[in-house]
Amino acid sequence: MGNYKDNKMQQLADKGNGNHAYIEDISEAQKVLVKEFGGTIFTIAKDVKLQIEFNPAKVRGYRLIGYENRLLNKEDFNDDKKDAGELGAGHTATALYEIIPVGVESEFLAKVDDLKYQKGALKVDNASKEFCTIKLRYKKPEGNISQLIEQPVLDSSIDIEKTSDNFRWSAAVAEFGMVLRQSEFKGNATYEHCKQLAQSAKGKDNNGYRREFIEMIDVMQSIDYPQSVRKE
């Protein structure tokens, strides 16, 4: 890596409302400077913020996977003076949450003492079929006042095999990151399972990006020999 530091480049890009990329070969240059160039140059929304409220009748606990350096305080969501990220033409952003449903015990749920000055439990709408409500705030490229989009999501359970390729692909990438970092939240995740999930979501892969990711999993699996042994 030499003196290249990805975290420093990310900070500079965030402060300047820009983007950064590490180009190591001609295919990466083609991806960054040709295929994704329009989305990098043309901003369609600025200061984009996402806020999710989970229904406590259905969700006991949750965790956002990644985005540790982009978290905002809840009061910052409605504050138009608070800077946030930009969204370029053709860009999409994916946020994955790990959910602990009501009735499921978990070692990661923090123990909280009863409130001293607030008696009784908060009222929960147990009849609602809503799983969560998603709120999105954004400003037009030349605007200074944000606009709000709000959308409730109904509770519906889908087997992972029946989900979209993009969903399974995102899950595979998140699993790879947790195994790579030996995250305390990785549970039973392994490189082998990550590879199987990614292969099931490869799809057409016209540009070969997903194939490259699967090859990366193979490389890490061969390097991380102790982890490969543990999963047997």
Image (tube, grey):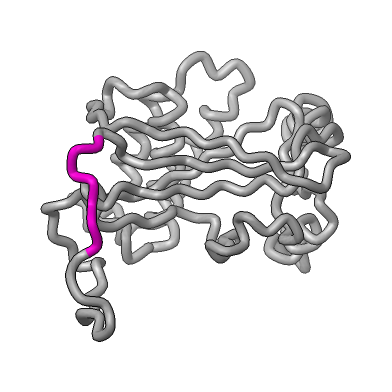
Q: Which of 56 and 1 is in front in this view?
A: 56
Q: In this figure, what is the number of numbered marks?
A: 0
The picture places residue 228, in percent across and down from the top left corner, at 29, 52
- Whether residue 176 is visible, yes or no, is no
**Residue drawn at the location 28% of the way across and 83% of the way down:** 117
**Residue drawn at the location 53% of the way across and 29% of the way down:** 210
The verdict on residue 114 being magenta is no
- Relative to residue 132, is residue 22 drawn left or right? right
Does 150 sit above or below residue 191? Answer: above
Asked which quadrant contains residue 73, the reply is bottom right
**Residue drawn at the location 25% of the way across and 26% of the way down:** 158
- Relative to residue 104, is residue 213 drawn left or right? right
Which secondary structure class fits the magenta region best? Answer: loop
- Relative to residue 133, is residue 139 drawn left or right? right
Asked which quadrant contains residue 11, the reply is bottom right
The magenta-colored residue range is 122-128
- Give the quadrant of the N terminus: bottom right
The picture places residue 114, in percent across and down from the top left corner, at 20, 79
Does 207 sit above or below residue 53? Answer: above
**Residue drawn at the location 49% of the way across and 44% of the way down:** 95
- Whether residue 101 is visible, yes or no, is yes
The picture places residue 174, in percent across and down from the top left corner, at 43, 46
Asked which quadrant contains residue 37, the reply is top right
The verdict on residue 123 being magenta is yes
Q: Nearer the viewer, residue 147 or 26?
A: 147
Q: Nearer the viewer, residue 224 or 90?
A: 90
- Farthest bottom residue in view: 116
- Relative to residue 75, is residue 188 drawn left or right? left
Does 65 sit above or below residue 182? Answer: above
